[in-house]
Image: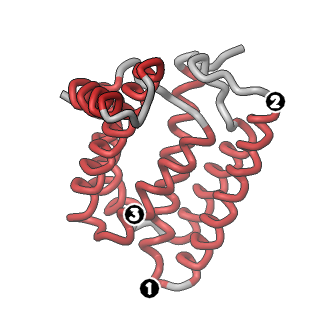
Amino acid sequence: MIETASKKVTSFFIEKGIIEESKRAMCEYSLYTRMLSCITSLFMYTIAIPTLGIVKSILLIKSVLDLRKRTGGFHADSEFKCFCISNIMILLLSWYLFPLASRLHNIKLVFSYIIYIVFIAIIAPINHYNNILTIEEITANKRKINKILSVLSILFVLGVMFEAMKDYAVIINLVVFTVMLSILLAKILHQEAH
C-alpha cells in the first residue's frame, strides 16, 4: 500500500516535471521511507497518548527516536517487523513500564539512570553493517549523543528534585533504558560492523 502510494506520487512528480525520470528510484524510496516513518509515528502517538498524555508522549517518542538515530542499535530485518517492534515497544513503555517505574524511589531512578547513560556514552554509536559510519560521522554522532543526554539529564534532575515533575524523570529514565537495551541487543545479535 505505502509502496504503491510512493510510486504514484513519484509518477505524478515526473509527469509535472518536478523531478527527472533518472531520479525515480531515489524519489520512490525517499517517499516510501518518509510515509512509513509518518505512519509508524502516528501509531506510536495513538498508543502512548491515552496513558501518558500529549506532552509526555512527545517527550518519550521524540527522545527515543532522536537518540536512537544517533546511537544506532538493534535493527529489524524488514520494515514491517520494525513497525511492529516499535509499536510494541511504545505499548510496553507507556502502558506497563511507565506505571511500574513511577513507583520507584528517586534513588533507584537516579542509580538506574546513571548506569544507562554511562553505558550509552561508552558503547554508542553502534556501527551497523547496513549503515557503516566514517570516523568523522562517529565523532559527530558522539557529540550529538552527548548533547541530547545533557538536555535529558537536566530534565531528569529537575524531575527528581520536584515531585510535580517526577513523571518526566520516569519518562527520561525509560528513554535511556530503551536506547541502552537497543544497543545491547545489537551487540548480542552481532549487528555491528567490524
Q: Which residue is mark 3?
A: 58
The local secondary structure at tag 2 comes to helix
Crowding at mark 3 (Cα within 10 Å: few <14, some 14-19, many 20+): some
Give whichever of discs 2 and 1 has the lower sequence position: 2
Q: Nearer the viewer, mark 2 or mark 1?
A: 2
Q: Position of residue 147 (x, y in %)?
A: 70, 58
Distance CA(mark 2)–CA(mark 1) = 42 Å
Q: Amino acid at mark 1?
A: Ala
Q: Which residue is mark 2?
A: 135
Q: Position of residue 180 (x, y in %)?
A: 57, 42
Q: How many marks?
A: 3
Q: Could you say which is closer to the camera, residue 137 or residue 153? A: 137
Q: Look at the picture and state if 77 lies above or below 125.
A: above
Quadrant of image for the N terminus:
top left
Count neighbours of disc 2 (C-alpha within 10 A) and say few if under 14, some if 14 to 19, many if 20 or more: few
Against 36, residue 116 (above or below) is below
- Residue, disc 1: 164
Residue 138 sits in which quadrant? top right
Q: Residues within 10 Å of mark 1 (few under 14, many from 20)?
A: few
Colouring scheme applied when the structure was drawn? secondary structure
**Residue 19 position within the rendered picture, expressed as x and y whole percent measured from the top left:** 43, 31
